[in-house]
Image: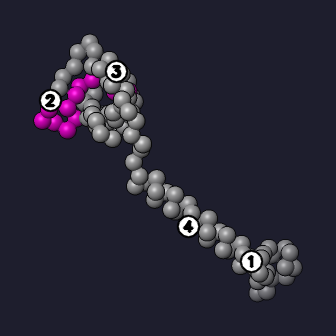
Amino acid sequence: MTDRRSESERGPERAGSADAAATRNRGAEAAATRKADGKRALFSSAVRRRGTLVVECSRCHGRTRVSYSEFVQRHLPYWLWTPWRHYSRYVVCPACGRRAWLAARWFE
C-alpha cells in the first residue's frame, strides 16, 4: 500500500530529506542529555550546609535537612535515644509531623 500524501503532509521524518536526519540527531542528543542529567541527579549528593544535619524518618522514609537548633527543639518535651539502633532517636519527624524513630546523619 502506498502513501498518497505529499512530502509536506508526511512530515520531515518520512520525507527522507536532510531535515529528517537533522531532526533525528537533535532528538538523540536531547535524549542523551536527559539520560545524563537523570544519572547525575540519581548518584549525586546534596550540598553540605554548615550548621545542619539530615534526619531520616523510619515511618515516612522522608529525608529532611534541619538546623542543629531545630533538631534540639524536636526532642522536646521528651525523647528516647538508643545508640545501638539505626533509627536511634524517638522524636517528631519534620516531614510527616508525627513521632517516629529518626536516624541523624551528621556528615551529609
- Judge left or right: residue 98 versus residue 33: left
Q: Residue 73: which quarter of the image?
A: top left
Seen in the picture, residue 29 relative to 55 is either above or below; the reply is: below
- Judge left or right: residue 32 versus residue 98: right
Crowd rating for badge 2 (residues with CA inside 10 Å; few <14, some 14–19, many 20+): few
Amino acid type of disc 4? Ala
Foreground residue, 42 or 90? 42
- Is residue 3 highlighted in magenta? no
Percent of width and height locating residue 11 = 79, 73
Task: Give the Cα distance between marks 2 and 3.
Answer: 21 Å
Q: Residue 66: which quarter of the image?
A: top left
Element on which disc 2 rests: loop
Residue receiving disc 4: 32
Element on which disc 4 rests: helix
Which segment did they paint magenta?
Answer: 83-94
- Judge left or right: residue 80 versus residue 75: left
Residue receiving disc 1: 20
Residue receiving disc 3: 69
User: Which is more N-terminal, label 1 or label 4?
Assistant: 1
On residue 82, the disc is 2
Disc 4 or disc 3, which is closer to the eye? 3
Q: Is residue 98 visible?
A: no
Foreground residue, 31 or 14? 31
Q: Residue at point 40% right, 36% down?
A: 49
Disc 3 or disc 1, which is closer to the eye? 3
Seen in the picture, residue 45 relative to 92 is either above or below; the reply is: below
